[in-house]
């Protein structure tokens, strides 16, 4: 099952300050409470984007924040993913290959983590698979110093030319939407640097919220803000809504046995199920904290919104996320 195409064309301008303030005070639209998490489905729509302005063309893309708050959020998101996978670190069938004993003259299994962030995934893989060598790269050297001896961090741009002298048994990336300009080229490099029988796994979160409620999304702040965010990153050549495109990119690059797995993460602790409720609690904090990291710069520096207007809009979106009556969830 493929995820929906990008959002329709953004027709309206920035949300008026008074309207954003009203939404922030309301918290969200009124919906009848219901704690059933069973019948959640994804919607779809398609369209295009508005044209670029000269100020956007001249914009110099900058990295997202990597301060301590953002690093803590990334580690929390890692915990959310492990809960979602029942404690596992990946779904690809490579565990036996990474655990295989290494004899004289044999090459140790190799793992590559693209855009590793805090490095927590790479560290966990190195701990769980001591026979494997783990290489993890990122633009920012924010990873810890005290790590397992079989993990190495490199400061590198994943979109630059990869060394052809290394092959990997498993290549992994997670939530790089909005950070990559040319996904097709990235997948081609990954394919060319995989050992025979190796696997590539990409995990991406759809940017838009969904709900099992009958919601008029055009009247919600979270939908409006997400449209602005997706549009802003599209204008600077860093597409954010890419979850539905990964399967096609993999096949285009030459990968075989390509499968797509969809999961749903509640965006607040609204489900009755204990595990889903806990998952929703952690993901709510992840989303709320992410709005500053991912929202302010695109809204103000790319789209030209006043900072106070952007902050009020983000506050209204946070209120909607926290409202359990909305039954929001993310598709991964």
Image (cartoon, rainbow, N blue to C red):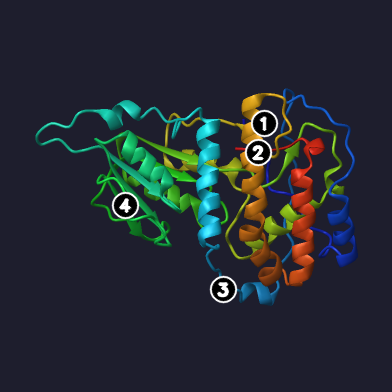
Taking the spot 64% from the left edge, 29% from the top edge, the residue there is 276
Image check: 55 left or right of 8? Answer: left
| Disc 2 element | helix
Say the numbered circle drawn on residue 72. Answer: none
| Disc 1 element | helix
Kindly indicate whether the residue at mark 3 contacts the one at mark 2 (C-beta within 8 angstroms).
Answer: no
Say the numbered circle drawn on residue 146. Answer: 4
- Mark 1 against mark 3, which lies toward the viewer? 1
Residue picked out by circle 1:
277
Cα separation, mark 1 vs mark 2, equals 6 Å
Q: Quadrant of residue 51?
A: bottom right
Q: Is residue 260 visible?
A: no
In percent of width and height, residue 296 lies at: 67, 64
Query: Which badge, 2 or 4, comes first in the chain's sequence?
Result: 4
Taking the spot 52% from the left edge, 65% from the top edge, the residue there is 63
Cα separation, mark 2 vs mark 3, equals 36 Å
| Disc 4 element | loop
Kindly indicate whether the residue at mark 2 contacts the one at mark 1 (C-beta within 8 angstroms).
Answer: yes
Where does the C terminus fall, quadrant-wise?
Answer: top right
Query: Which badge, 1 or 4, comes first in the chain's sequence?
Result: 4
Cα separation, mark 1 vs mark 3, equals 41 Å
Cα separation, mark 3 vs mark 4, equals 34 Å
Furthest toward the left, the residue is 104
Where does the N terminus fall, quadrant-wise?
Answer: top right
- Mark 3 against mark 4, which lies toward the viewer? 4
Number of marks: 4
Classed neighbour count for the residue bearing mark 3: other residues with Cα under 10 Å, few (<14), some (14–19), many (≥20): few
Residue picked out by circle 2:
281
Say the numbered circle drawn on residue 60. Answer: 3
| Disc 3 element | loop
In percent of width and height, residue 300 lies at: 70, 70
């Amino acid at each position: 099952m493929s995820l929906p195409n990008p959002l329709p064309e953004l027709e309206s301008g920035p949300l008026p300050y008074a309207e954003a303030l009203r939404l922030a005070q309301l918290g969200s639209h009124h919906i009848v409470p219901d704690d059933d998490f069973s019948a959640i489905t994804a919607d779809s729509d398609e369209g295009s984007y508005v044209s670029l302005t000269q100020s956007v063309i001249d914009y110099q893309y900058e990295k997202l924040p990597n301060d301590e708050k953002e690093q803590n959020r990334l580690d929390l998101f890692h915990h959310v993913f492990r809960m979602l996978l029942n404690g596992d670190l990946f779904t690809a069938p490579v565990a036996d290959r990474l655990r295989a004993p290494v004899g004289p003259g044999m090459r140790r299994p190799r793992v590559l983590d693209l855009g590793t962030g805090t490095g927590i995934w790479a560290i966990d893989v190195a701990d769980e698979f001591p026979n494997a060598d783990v290489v993890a790269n990122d633009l920012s050297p924010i990873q810890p110093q005290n790590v397992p001896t079989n993990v190495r961090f490199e400061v590198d741009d994943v979109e630059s030319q990869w060394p052809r002298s290394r092959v990997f048994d498993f290549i992994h990336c997670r939530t790089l939407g909005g950070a990559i300009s040319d996904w097709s080229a990235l997948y081609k490099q990954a394919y060319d640097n995989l050992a025979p029988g190796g696997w590539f796994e990409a995990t991406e979160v759809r940017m838009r919220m969904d709900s099992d409620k009958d919601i008029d999304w055009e009247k919600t702040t979270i939908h409006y803000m997400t449209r602005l965010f997706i549009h802003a990153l599209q204008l600077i050549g860093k597409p954010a809504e890419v979850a539905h495109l990964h399967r096609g990119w993999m096949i285009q690059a030459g990968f075989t046995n390509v499968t797509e797995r969809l999961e749903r993460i509640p965006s607040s602790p609204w489900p009755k199920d204990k595990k889903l409720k806990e998952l929703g609690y952690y993901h709510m904090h992840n989303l709320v904290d992410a709005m500053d990291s991912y929202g302010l710069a695109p809204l103000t520096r790319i789209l030209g919104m006043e900072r106070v207007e952007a902050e009020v809009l983000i506050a209204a979106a946070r209120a909607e996320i926290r409202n359990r009556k909305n039954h929001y969830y993310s598709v991964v």
